[in-house]
Amino acid sequence: MSSNSLCVGVVAPLTGRLAPLGSPLSHVLRRLAPLLAHVRNGGRRHDVTVAVRDSRSDPDAARQAVRDLADAEGANLVLTMAGTQVLPAVTDACEKAGAPCVSTTFPWQAYVDARGAEPGHRFRWTYHFAWGLDDIAAVFADLWDHVDDSGPVGCLWNDDVQGRLLRHDRYGFAPVTSPRGHTLVDLGAYREPAGGFHAQVGRLRGHGADLVTSAATATDLALFHRQAREAGLRPRLITCSRWLTYPHTHTTPAPDVHGELADARVATLVYWSPGHPYRSSLDGITCAELAHAYRQATGAAWLQPLGLAHALVEIAHHALTVAADPTDRASVAQALAGTTLDTIAGTLDWTCGPTPNIALLPLVGGQWQPGPGGPRLAVVSNSALPGVPLTGELTPAR
């Protein structure tokens, strides 16, 4: 690579269990390739190559991908998204290699904790944009208020990092939901994938809870819902983050899971949708236009990571155009630290995050509702972002 050329490295899950979440990033890279081929910085034109490596949805493969990009390709900047184990592997490898990195797709507390750090720690090379567990809790409390503001909420949380963080006494759910009058009842930790939820269903009955919140996989949540119904229980509303933010067809291959979750009327968080009032800083495309272009190109429905994938590329382009020396990794990292940019995912501001290296995205509430082409994600609560139009009303299970 010549001294005047630049390289953007991308670690994406092109194969393995996370592969469906690599599709939006692949689409965005193809679509924006002409705009990313060259950048101008201080009157100088730089050629840009984009080098993509498959994480194979595996942490070890992701680390090797970073080493290839940093050493063999000389990447000036690395982009990544998806995977509660894979993403931290990428960011830690970038930190070790001294390669600037921008990532997205899960709560910032999980991003920090998974890397063995505490809030307040400052990473030198790695930057992340997302939302917080407290933001999820606030959205879910809004949804619970729509249904029942007095009964206890059963918490179906696993025994892994997600469950531990959701139970955290400082930045878990309780500090946000308790002041709003909601009582959380822990139904008991479980291991993924779950073999059964009879103990949790028993606790749900014992506490008389008809609201449930979770961060389960779609398969586990469907099993819990089925066993609850078999026991004569029917939660009025289930709120679920993590896997249920994506279309069911991308995360649950079994048809019986589709039907079970459609019947449960699961509500979830929404961080991006075609209705969000944003435009790309690169080509001016709107959220609605991007969602339409994705369907036209892939035949698949939009999914939330699409907007975040596009924003990743916008941030990369911006950093390379404003860095004091885009060929110097330290200069690129410094540019990221001072970035404030209006993107198709909203305004990303690394100068005033809740902790260093973090830019926040606001959340609204959504619900999976029946539609003519299968389940659709309707926006049903927009307290934190009134500019996002409501596209449905929250409907409790009957």
Image (spheres, rainbow, N blue to C red):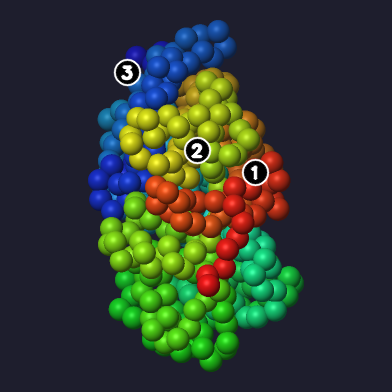
Compare marks 3 and 1 and give the one earlier in the sequence.
3
Q: Quadrant of residue 223?
A: bottom left
Q: Is residue 14 left or right of residue 91?
A: left
Q: Residue furthest front?
A: 372
Q: CA distance from mark 1 to mark 2?
A: 17 Å
Q: Residue at x 36, y 64 (%)?
A: 259
Q: Residue 398 has which mark?
A: none
**Quarter placement of the N terminus:** top left
Q: Are marks 3 and 1 in contact (CB under 8 Å)?
A: no
Q: Is residue 19 left or right of residue 325?
A: left
Q: Residue at x 33, y 46 (%)?
A: 20
Q: Which residue is mark 2?
A: 307
Q: Is 353 located above or below residue 243 in the figure?
A: above
Q: Of 81 and 333, which appears nearest the observer?
A: 81
Q: Quadrant of residue 81?
A: top left
Q: Amino acid at mark 2?
A: Gly
Q: Nearer the viewer, mark 3 or mark 1?
A: 1
Q: Of 95 and 347, which appears nearest the observer?
A: 347
Q: Secondary structure at mark 2?
A: helix
Measured as percent of width and height from the top left, residue 69 is found at: 32, 34
Q: CA distance from mark 3 to mark 2?
A: 31 Å
Q: Amino acid at mark 3?
A: Met
Q: Amino acid at mark 1?
A: Pro
Q: Which residue is mark 3?
A: 1
Compare marks 3 and 2 and give the one earlier in the sequence.
3
Q: Residue at x 45, y 86 (%)?
A: 232
Measured as percent of width and height from the top left, residue 291 is found at: 47, 35
Q: Of 22 and 113, which appears nearest the observer?
A: 22
Measured as percent of width and height from the top left, residue 57 is found at: 29, 50
Q: Which residue is mark 1?
A: 389
